[in-house]
Image: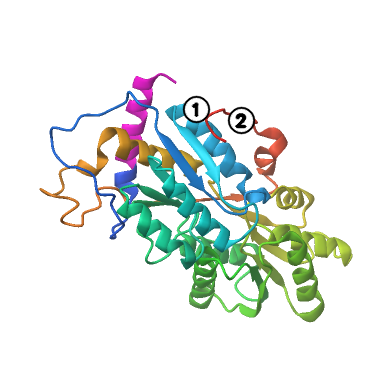
Amino acid sequence: MKKKVVAILTTVCMAAGLLIGCGGNAGQSEQSQGSETKADTSEQKSYYYVGINHNHPYWYDVHQGFEFAAEQFGCKVTKVGPDDFDFTAQAEALEQAITKKPDGIIVPIFDASILPGIKKAKEAGIPVVAIESTMEGAEVDTYIGLDNEDAGRQTAAKLIEEAGEKGKVVVMGNYTAANTQQKLAGFKSYLEENSSWEILAELDDNVDTSTALETAKTAFNNYKDMTAIVGLDSSSGAGVAGAMEELNLEPGSITVVVHDREVATLENVKAGYINCTLVNKTASMPYEALAVLEQITKYNAQNIPISADNAGSDVNTLPSNMYTGVVFVTKDNVDNFLVENMTELNSDLYE
């Protein structure tokens, strides 16, 4: 895409973001303010994505989003961080990324161990955008992703739609992660306010497919009066469906509502073991995150005249939250989400 077109698109993107963003005090990067500043599109910017659990199938769509977005904006994105769910290793990767002095950083925030590094990046004048998950105390310029509590509420509403206003449910998830905790809170509050459902147990599957399989088998074996099972992370769906197959339970014999678009989850929606899965618009998160960073680094978004001194007044000119919303995948639309039906992207700008 030509540079002028990119400039127009990113400006429009930020305008839309300002309309949908919610209030709050995010950490605005300290950069000079003044009407004399001009857009600088001459230099290719370099950003770091400090991720976690890179090899898990959930992140496939995020990586594809980075491939697409890096080409559209003509920027360089370097991927760092652990291939497993290791909070300490992610925090260490962030510290190392800061020493490279990138133009900006994108990071999912699941655990408080990463917060000191984010603060250090801010103090170094590096803008930081959180995607997928954030938490209180994260000094980021913007969070882009699900409203996780609302996602939990929508999950509960979908359960009621699929199985009625009463029943007994077991909930699975990775409860060490901030986003799963928020989803669970929304799920429980909606059920309490709108139904007579009883939650029999909250079982932790450690966002690991083999653990999720054993956890689901435990649920089926120990809670014989269970009428539904809900999974709040990306491994739950594969675990539940796998357990049903091993235990010779027929598809549709119990209501199953899960989250995310892991390959096995989608295949089991198609096979009928899973009623539906709630998915984040995962590939849009990197796109919007890079649009925000381009606005800061090239188009002086931090200098939008909200005050005479935005940094000194602790004014974040950007949307504090940009919520991507959710999509429910069912038998009716699952083919459109299967990996084999998606366009494979591979850009030299994302590595």
Residue 55: image x %, image y %? Answer: 67, 49
* Element assignment for label 1: helix
Q: Amino acid at mark 1?
A: Glu
Q: Tell me which residue sits at (44%, 27%) in the image.
A: 74
Residue 120 appears in which quarter of the rendering? bottom left
Which span is picked out in magenta? 1-16
* Callout 2: SS: loop
Q: Residues within 10 Å of mark 2 (few under 14, many from 20)?
A: few
- Main secondary structure along the magenta-highlighted residues: helix
- Check whether the beta carbons of the residues at disc 2 and disc 1 lie within 8 A of each other: yes
Q: Residue at x 47, y 43 (%)?
A: 48
Q: Would residue 324 be visible to someone looking at this image?
A: no
Marks 2 and 1, Cα distance to the nearest angstrom?
Answer: 10 Å
Count all numbered tags in the image, as a single digit: 2
- Classify 182 as above or below 283: below
Q: What residue did someone put label 1 on?
A: 71
**Residue under numbered circle 2:** 345
Queried whether the magenta region covers residue 223, the answer comes back as no
- Residue at left offset 75%, top offset 66%: 211
In the depicted structure, whether residue 194 falls above or below residue 283: below
Q: In terms of sequence position, does the residue under pointer 2 or pointer 1 come before the other?
A: 1
| Nearer to the camera, 321 or 275 | 321
Which residue reaches farthest front? 99
Is 255 left, or right, of 21 in this rendering?
A: right
Give residue 173's quadrant in the image: bottom right
* 296 relative position to 59: left or right: left
**Where in the figure is residue 155, as x and y percent of width and height?**
57, 63
**Relative to residue 222, is residue 99 depicted above or below?**
above
Q: How are the residues colored?
A: rainbow
Please tell me which residue is depicted at 76% across the width and 69% down the height of the picture: 216
Depth order, front residue of 38/235: 38
Q: Quadrant of the N terminus?
A: top left
